[in-house]
Amino acid sequence: MHTSDLHFGRPAVEEQLDSLKSSIVELAPDAVAVSGDLTQRCSTFEFLKARAYLDEIRETAPVIVIPGNHDVRWIGAVARNLDVWRKTAHDFKYSKYTRHISPELNPSLEVPGTPGAVIAGCNTAHGISRGSLTRRFRDLGVIGHVNQRDLRKVEEAFAHAAPDDARVVMIHHNPIRGAVSGRHGLANTRQALRSFADLGTELVLCGHDHQDAVHTVEEGAPGLVVSTAGTISNRLRAGRPSSFNLVEIDESNLRITTYSWRNPEGFAPSREHSFPRRAASRSA
Ligand SMILES: [Fe+2]
Ligand SMILES: [Fe+2]
């Protein structure tokens, strides 16, 4: 199960979070992947709420989680960009996330099965940094990028994958332009997607745009599937409901079902996409 942008704090909707938890129990996924923006204002209170929630989910399924731009502290981000106390500023920037959620910003998870999967988390939330510079002032500190050091972590994670395992990368920022927002989340989209494809990635999980979407990449990394999970909060885009994506992978197909919020029933399947697996077409 792939979910994103829970935004604990004012945007959180308790009813939806409870329903998401029930869906996890009901669907019993092999893993729950949470692609960032756990908090709204990066506050300790919000992180504590997020941590307690993740711990409850962990009772049902293993959880892999990465930070989003809302989970990074700004002062540290600015200081790092100015090269002031580089290490200290870097630690400060992620200190709340690492204290309350996980010390690992690029975690990975091996999901056993036939076929199995390896999910590699790749942190794209660097605050205001050189790689994320943008001319659009309102995107300052919002846009993300994929850097070489984090890519190496993905490579290391995939080194443990069996040949038939699905290689899945999870990032926070959407590499595909949002249909309603018109925004790319990543500064170096093309390069990032090509690097992921070169590492044998079949599927990229992301969030950030607050609008669910499923795409295949045409240029640079043809056939790569991108699953953008919507938000579970009241920060909705153009009236689109909260949603999460369920990803099912077998030997030959990859299927993504979007579950959307329908009051009062809870989350229900609303759309389905199916793709032949890249690994299957390679060995055919
Ligand atoms: Fe978000
Ligand atoms: Fe975000």
Image (cartoon, rainbow, N blue to C red):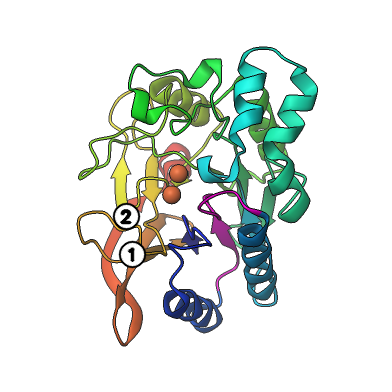
Q: Which mark is residue 71?
A: none
Query: Label 1 belongs to which residue?
Result: 258
Residue type marked 2:
Asp
271 sits to left or right of 89: left
Q: Tell me, yes or no, whether the highlighted magenta stretch contains residue 105.
A: no
Query: Label 2 belongs to which residue?
Result: 212
Residue type marked 1:
Thr
- Describe the element under mark 1 as helix, strand or loop: strand
2 vs 1, front mark? 2
The relative height of residue 196 versus residue 241 in the rendered view (above or below) is: above
Name the residue located 61 percent from the left edge and 47 percent from the top edge: 66
How far apart are labels 2 and 1 at the CA level?
8 Å
Name the residue located 45 percent from the left edge and 20 percent from the top edge: 191
Q: Are marks 2 and 1 in contact (CB under 8 Å)?
A: yes
| Crowdedness near tag 1: few (<14), some (14–19) or many (≥20) residues, C-alpha within 10 Å | many
Region rendered in magenta: 29-43
The relative height of residue 158 versus residue 244 in the rendered view (above or below) is: above
Extreme-bottom residue of the structure: 264
Q: Quadrant of residue 232?
A: bottom left
- Horizontal and vertical percent position of residue 173: 45, 38
- Which of the image's four quarters has the C terminus? top left
Badge 2 or badge 1: first in the primary sequence:
2
How many badges with numbers are in the image?
2
Q: Confirm if mark 1 falls within 8 A of ligand 1.
A: no
11 sits to left or right of 176: right
181 sits to left or right of 12: left
Name the residue located 38 percent from the left edge and 29 percent from the top edge: 139
The relative height of residue 99 versus residue 105 in the rendered view (above or below) is: below
The relative height of residue 246 versus residue 264 in the rendered view (above or below) is: above
